[in-house]
Amino acid sequence: MQKLKILLLILIPALLLTACSKESEDSILLAAKNKLEEAKKLDTENKPEEAKKGYGEAVEMYKKFLTEYPSSQKAPEVYSSIAKIYVDNLRDYPNAIKYYEELTQKHPATKESKYGMFMVAFIYDEMLKNKDKAKENYKKFLDKYPKDEDPNEKMSESARMMLQMLDENRSIEDIIKNTSKDSVKQETPKKDDAKKEDVKKDEVKKEAPKTETDPDGNPTDNDTKKNP
């Protein structure tokens, strides 16, 4: 019993010290957000090396959050933030894919997971130009999300279109050009239709009753009698 008391006296202060030294979720996220804003400001001031360092520090703060709070409800959003910095600011596409994939594996039922799956395929397609991996991941995405539950998302629709373009070896520009041509065809009237329309107008003019008027523009008596 005496040994247990001694052990508790040793452990309790250590546990209290650990609890006090651990930052809260909100404080870590606020620090990461502020660091990210600083880095963006340095970017606008044309200080790329300092900005790059700031982005790296923001990423490390977000990673610290995931280490200390892996089960937090905010974890999916943090994974997305890390991956987004790697894509938009550091141009580190392999690491972006890594964190998007971790997001989809650890939080598969979240909206961030759906976005992460799409982005893995998109990065392979547009940034890394790895068409085989892009096809593989677009198919994987469509297997899980064959249609958009939210009509405003359009991710499944976009994935299907991107996969089709890869299969047909076409670009977005090709599709836009073809769409424009189809629109012009629909809007341009056919010559035969235009001729028919002119014939109809001539026939209407011939059939329309002529009204005789006096020099002042008033109907004559003959017209008045015909139309009492």
Image (cartoon, rainbow, N blue to C red):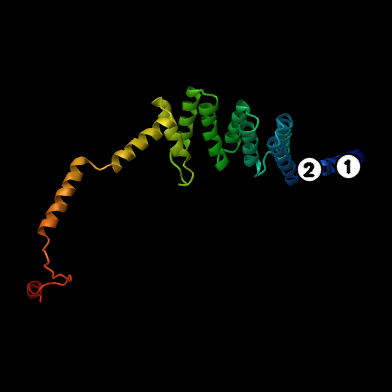
Q: Residue at x 12, y 61 (%)?
A: 208
Give amino acid for label 1: Pro
Mark 1 surroundings within 10 Å by alpha-carbon count, few (fewer than 14), some (14 through 19), many (20 or more): few
Residue 195: x percent and y percent?
17, 44
Position of the N terminus, as image quadrant, is top right
In whole angstroms, how far apart are the C-alphas of marks 2 and 1?
18 Å
Label disc, if present, on residue 13 of the rendered structure = 1
In the image, residue 112 lies at what x, y percent?
A: 57, 40
Disc 2 vs disc 1: which is toward the camera? 2
**Residue lying farthest bottom?**
228
**Residue annotated with mark 2:** 23
Instruction: Locate residue 46 relative to residue 184 in the image: left or right.
Output: right
* Within-10-Å neighbours for mark 2: few <14, some 14–19, many 20+: some
Is residue 18 visible in the rendered image? The answer is yes
Q: Amino acid at mark 2?
A: Glu
54 with respect to 191 (left or right): right
Vertical position of residue 191 compared to residue 162: above or below:
below
The x and y percentages for residue 154 are 46, 42
State the count of labels: 2
Q: Residue furthest front?
A: 215
Q: Nearest the camera: 220 or 201?
A: 220
Q: Nearer the viewer, residue 141 or 171?
A: 171
Using the rendered view, name the quadrant where residue 224 is placed: bottom left
**Residue 114 at x, y percent in the picture:** 53, 38
Q: Nearer the viewer, residue 56 or 133?
A: 56
Q: Is residue 57 above or below residue 193?
A: above
Do the residues bearing badges 2 and 1 touch, measured as CB atoms within 8 Å? no
Does residue 110 show up? no
